[in-house]
Image: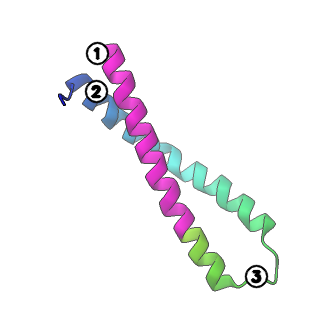
Amino acid sequence: MELSLAGLIGAVLGTMVSAAVYGPLIDAVEGGLRKRRAATDDRATFAQEIALLRRGILAANILLCAGLGYWIGLALGG
């Protein structure tokens, strides 16, 4: 498999976009979950779920944006 320079530049730019989008995305998702959480839920369990959710969103966000950036860079730069 041959890697394209334009694709790699697009992947780096996509990763930068994912870093910029991560904070607002996490705030929105976490805020929604906190509103739905029942008062009787265990705080420690909820904190673990939030931490796991943050890691999952970060991984998916980086993979999606870097992949999309590579594809766009490859399409535009050849």
Q: Are marks 2 and 3 in contact (CB under 8 Å)?
A: no
**Residue 68 — which label?**
none
Crowding at dot 1, Cα within 10 Å, few <14 / some 14-19 / many 20+, comes out as: few
Q: Is residue 62 visible?
A: yes
Q: Is residue 19 visible?
A: no
Instruction: Estimate the x, y position of residue 19 in percent, counting from the top left.
Output: 44, 47
Compared with residue 62, is residue 45 higher up or lower down, i.e. above or below? below
- Find out whether residue 38 is within the magenta segment: no
The structure residue drawn at horizontal position 63% and vertical position 56%, both measured from the top left corner, is: 27
Q: Which residue is mark 1?
A: 77
User: Where are the magenta residues, as a range?
Assistant: 52-78
With 62 as the anchor, is 12 left or right in this view?
left
Q: Are marks 2 and 1 in contact (CB under 8 Å)?
A: yes
With 3 as the anchor, is 31 left or right in this view?
right
Question: What's the distance in space between the residues labelled 2 and 1, CA to CA?
Answer: 7 Å
Instruction: Estimate the x, y position of residue 36 in percent, counting from the top left.
Output: 80, 66
The structure residue drawn at horizontal position 39% and vertical position 23%, both measured from the top left corner, is: 72
- Find out whether residue 70 is within the magenta segment: yes
Q: For mark 3, give the secondary structure.
A: loop
The structure residue drawn at horizontal position 44% and vertical position 38%, both measured from the top left corner, is: 65
Question: What's the distance in space between the residues labelled 1 and 3, CA to CA?
Answer: 51 Å
Q: Which mark is first along the chain, 1 or 2? A: 2
**Residue 7 — which label?**
2
Q: Which residue is mark 3?
A: 41
